[in-house]
């Protein structure tokens, strides 16, 4: 493979021959010279190609070099006299690979709204902003694996098709091979592909718990699906979740791992993606660098749910959802806590058991569970997690209260019957992390192919 533009830009310009392959961002000619900026997605910057009229096909090729066409350039890498770039390429040959008719190519060089770009999901990764989002997303994904690998975690590939609804919120998409009319019959899933009702996973947690009881420290990182009809800038029907699960770990150990993970991921992007981040700091979210450095450096504020309710009441703000002990915190409450009260990420723990799933460990007061949500400025909830209930009888009681059929979760109860240990874990919403890091306001713009109610392009 030939070097990418990112690699070329780091080479010393010892008058060496190079080949550039990419797409034209701009082309302007002046007199007997033509300056062509070529990009290839490897980094935000393009490389400047200078073509002189002595080139054999100069007159024909310059006319064809519209924004978006693909080219192959052979030439010499030389120091650049222009500002803002160390090197440029003196073209010896330019070949047009693929045309892009300016009369119809939608991505002409001007600012486009993110809404418009969503309507051309197949072309938007070629823009500066969406291109930068995807490089940052890739760096974060790699950093997630490195973080866990360096700490002795094993990656477990949990299933996408599952028969357990982990969150118990009834938001599972059903997977069926039955004809639609058969679905109207009684117990239709007995005759279905799997012989029982199956769906797309809402979380890999329950399966990760199995492996935490054999391998100690594990994590899963994959797509999850929720059929919730929330058309907000923070919800997707298909999103990626990072879910570690740790044996011999309690709530405070869980919170410490989550805090360390976020700190390390932020440090990685600050170190490795500064050019791309600068674009967001300038055009999307002023003060982004400062926000990320602050979150990476300082330890998060911890408070219990009961303390959080106290703070929200004291705030005397006109919240749309009234504040009372027992309510589920709404986005406006979460944002108040981390943005106005703390000015940095906040870990809220020990929520009322009635608003949390069956698997969370019951606290000694019998009213709250060992849950934790991590709230970050601009987003609200980034992480949801808990210490799990490891005591068989208490878990059975909680399942009964939640109306779950224990036969279906017998395997889960076996983990408590045989060698049960205190254990904990959490789920980090990967797109919300990318939103936090880039400052992008809409979650649909930080995933290549957003799936939301009414939209599933290609
Ligand atoms: O809080 P949640 O629902 O937690 C779980 O699913 C646990 N089983 C995780 C665990 O303990 N292993 O989801 C975890 C995170 C949320 O904090 C949020 O960041 C993200 O997943 N999330 C979504 N992101 C985008 N679109 C949605 N519809 C999301 N729902 C949750
Ligand atoms: Mg949650």
Image (tube, rainbow, N blue to C red):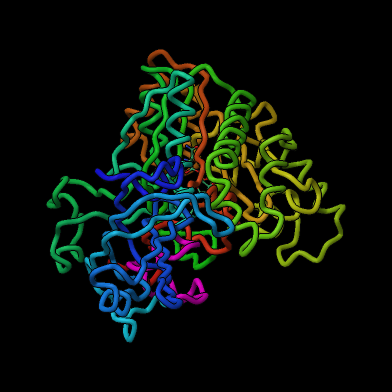
Tell me if residue 282 comes above or below residue 203 in the rendering: below
- Where is residue 323 shown, x and y percent of the image? 75, 56
Residues 428 and 102: in front is 102
Residues 112 and 33: in front is 33
Determine the image quadrant of residue 252.
top right
Is 329 contained in the magenta span? no
Q: What stretch is highlighted in magenta?
A: 109-130
For the N terminus, the image quarter is top left
The residue drawn where x is 46% and y is 23% is 392
Is 123 contained in the magenta span? yes
The residue drawn where x is 68% and y is 51% is 377
- Where is residue 30 shown, x and y percent of the image? 45, 77
Left or right: 174 with respect to 418?
Answer: left
Determine the image quadrant of residue 187.
bottom left
Left or right: 288 with respect to 248?
Answer: right
The residue drawn where x is 52% and y is 75% is 111
Residues 9 and 31: in front is 31
The residue sitting at the bottom extreme is 103
Left or right: 29 with respect to 334?
Answer: left
Determine the image quadrant of residue 457.
bottom left
């Amino acid at each position: 493979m030939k070097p990418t533009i990112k690699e070329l830009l780091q080479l010393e310009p010892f008058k060496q021959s190079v080949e550039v392959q990419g797409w034209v961002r701009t082309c302007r000619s002046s007199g007997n010279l033509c300056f062509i900026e070529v990009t290839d997605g490897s980094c935000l910057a393009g490389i400047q190609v200078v073509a002189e009229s002595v080139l054999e096909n100069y007159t024909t090729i310059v006319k064809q070099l519209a924004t978006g066409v693909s080219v192959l350039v052979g030439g010499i890498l030389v120091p650049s006299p222009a500002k803002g770039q160390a090197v440029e390429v003196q073209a010896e040959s330019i070949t047009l690979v693929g045309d892009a008719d300016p009369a119809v190519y939608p991505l002409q060089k001007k600012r486009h709204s993110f809404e418009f770009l969503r309507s051309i999901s197949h072309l938007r990764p070629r823009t500066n902003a969406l291109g930068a989002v995807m490089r940052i997303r890739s760096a974060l994904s790699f950093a997630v694996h490195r973080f866990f690998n360096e700490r002795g975690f094993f990656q477990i590939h949990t299933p996408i098709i599952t028969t357990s609804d982990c969150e118990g919120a009834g938001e599972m998409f059903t997977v069926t091979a039955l004809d639609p009319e058969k679905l109207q019959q009684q117990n239709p899933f007995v005759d279905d592909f799997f012989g029982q009702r199956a769906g797309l996973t809402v979380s890999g947690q329950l399966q990760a718990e199995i492996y935490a009881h054999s391998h100690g420290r594990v994590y899963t990182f994959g797509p999850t699906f929720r059929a919730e009809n929330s058309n907000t800038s923070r919800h997707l029907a298909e999103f990626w979740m990072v879910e570690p699960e740790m044996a011999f770990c309690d709530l405070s150990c869980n919170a410490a791992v989550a805090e360390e993970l976020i700190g390390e991921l932020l440090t990685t992007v600050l170190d490795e993606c500064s050019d791309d981040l600068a674009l967001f700091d300038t055009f999307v979210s002023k003060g982004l660098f400062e926000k990320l450095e602050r979150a990476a450096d300082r330890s998060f504020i911890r408070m219990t749910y009961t303390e959080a309710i106290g703070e929200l009441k004291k705030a005397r703000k006109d919240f749309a959802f009234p504040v009372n002990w027992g309510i589920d915190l709404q986005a406006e409450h979460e944002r108040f806590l981390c943005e106005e009260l703390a000015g940095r990420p906040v870990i809220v723990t020990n929520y009322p058991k009635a608003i949390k799933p069956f698997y969370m460990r019951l606290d000694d007061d019998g009213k709250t569970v060992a849950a934790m949500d991590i709230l970050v400025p601009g987003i609200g909830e980034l992480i949801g997690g808990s210490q799990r209930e490891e005591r068989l009888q208490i878990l059975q009681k909680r399942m009964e209260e939640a109306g779950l059929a224990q036969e279906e979760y017998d395997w889960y109860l076996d983990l408590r019957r045989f060698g049960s240990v205190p254990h904990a874990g959490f789920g980090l919403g990967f797109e919300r992390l990318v939103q936090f890091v880039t400052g992008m306001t809409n979650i649909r713009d930080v995933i290549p192919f957003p799936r939301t109610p009414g939209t599933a392009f290609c």
